[in-house]
Image (cartoon, rainbow, N blue to C red):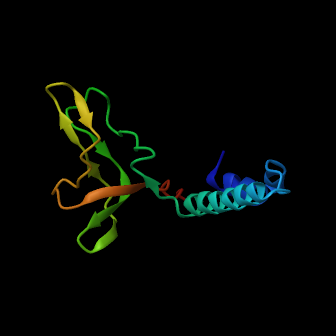
């Protein structure tokens, strides 16, 4: 399913109202919470940012590589708040002793900022 199709289904999902009976105060509260959650989900789908707590990007290099590289845009939290880093490569820490990628320490190779979100790069344009 494409991101656009998911947004369309969530936005036009009138059937959501059938999930929760709103004849009680508790039902009305749940209905409001459901609509707020849907609004958040739609906004997240629209802007494309994915929290590193929700999911991590796939490694672009072969599994037997001695390093790990991911091509994506990232948002990093620094002293002055969150900023977007428009670089195309990200290197995660990699421990060759145990052949394991460390996902807990998300830093740029310079180690300056904590990565909080990421976004896959779009497909390159087709040649005409």
User: Which residue shows up at 53% across the image and 64% down it?
Assistant: 47
Residue 94 percent across, percent down from the top left: 20, 37
* Left or right of 25 in this view: 48: left
Q: Is residue 19 above or below residue 113?
A: above
* Left or right of 46 in this view: 102: left
Residue 51 percent across, percent down from the top left: 43, 53
User: Which residue shows up at 82% across the image and 55% down it?
Assistant: 17
* Residue occupying the far bottom of the picture: 80
Whether residue 120 is visible here, answered yes or no, is: no
User: Which residue shows up at 31% across the image and 28% down it?
Assistant: 63
Quick one: quadrant of the N terminus? Answer: top right
Residue 116 percent across, percent down from the top left: 35, 57
Residue 117 percent across, percent down from the top left: 39, 56
Between 68 and 41, the residue placed more toward the observer is 41
Label total for image: 0
* Residue occupying the far front of the picture: 25
Rendering quarter of residue 108: bottom left
Between 38 and 3, the residue placed more toward the observer is 38
Whether residue 63 is visible here, answered yes or no, is: yes
Rendering quarter of residue 95: top left
Quick one: quadrant of the C terminus? Answer: bottom right
* Left or right of 113 in this view: 57: right
């Amino acid at each position: 399913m494409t991101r656009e199709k998911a947004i369309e289904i969530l936005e036009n999902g009138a059937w959501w109202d059938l999930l929760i009976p709103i004849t009680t105060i508790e039902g009305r509260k749940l209905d409001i919470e459901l609509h707020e959650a849907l609004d958040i989900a739609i906004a997240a789908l629209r802007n494309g940012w994915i929290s590193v707590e929700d999911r991590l990007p796939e490694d672009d290099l072969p599994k037997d590589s001695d390093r790990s590289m991911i091509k994506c845009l990232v948002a990093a939290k620094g002293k002055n708040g969150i900023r977007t880093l428009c670089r195309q490569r990200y290197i995660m820490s990699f421990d060759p002793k145990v052949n394991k990628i460390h996902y807990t320490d998300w830093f740029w190779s310079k180690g300056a900022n904590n990565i909080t979100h990421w976004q896959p790069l779009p497909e390159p344009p087709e040649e005409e």
